[in-house]
Amino acid sequence: MSIETLRHFFAWCFVFNYAMLLLWFALHMGLHSWFTGLSRRFFNVAPEKYDSITLKAMFFFKLAVFLFNLAPYLALRVIS
């Protein structure tokens, strides 16, 4: 596998994962009351706790995307 192929792979992984993060954020903002009601009904989670959990998960996912997709892509850009 060539460096060029790996660069394309990490670039597309970053684009796909960041698009998933943006979709998650849009759904969270657009359907907030529905998701909080669903979490309260099935898991007995308060809306404040739901928001805290969701935002921490989004932060973790964004950090993972940067660490595992963007960092290798930039490293491959630097060496080639």
Image: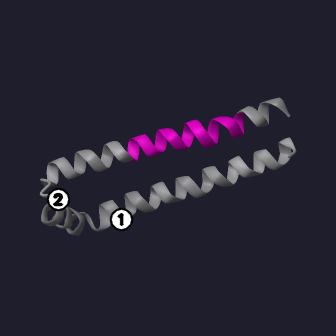
Residue numbers of the magenta segment? 58-74
- 67 in magenta: yes
Q: Is residue 6 left or right of residue 72?
A: right
* Residue type, numbered disc 1: Leu
The quadrant of the image that shows the C terminus is top right
**Along the line of sight, the residue nearer the viewer: 9 or 33:** 9
The answer to if 44 sits in the magenta stretch is no
Q: Is residue 23 above or below residue 10?
A: below
Camera-side mark, 2 or 1: 2
Residue 30 found in image quarter = bottom left
Tell me which label, 2 or 1, sits earlier in the chain. Answer: 1
Percent across and percent down for residue 14 are 61, 50
Q: Residue at x 69, y 47 (%)?
A: 10
The residue at 17%/59% (across/down) is 43
Q: Is residue 78 above or below residue 19?
A: above
- The quadrant holding residue 69 is top right
At label 2, which amino acid type do we have? Phe
SS type, badge 2? helix
Q: Main secondary structure of the magenta part?
A: helix
Disc 1 crowd, CA 10 A, few/some/many (<14, 14-19, 20+): few
Callout 1 secondary element: helix
Say which residue label 1 marks: 27
Q: CA distance from mark 2 to mark 1?
A: 19 Å
| Residue 55, percent from left and from top | 31, 46
Q: Which residue is mark 2?
A: 43
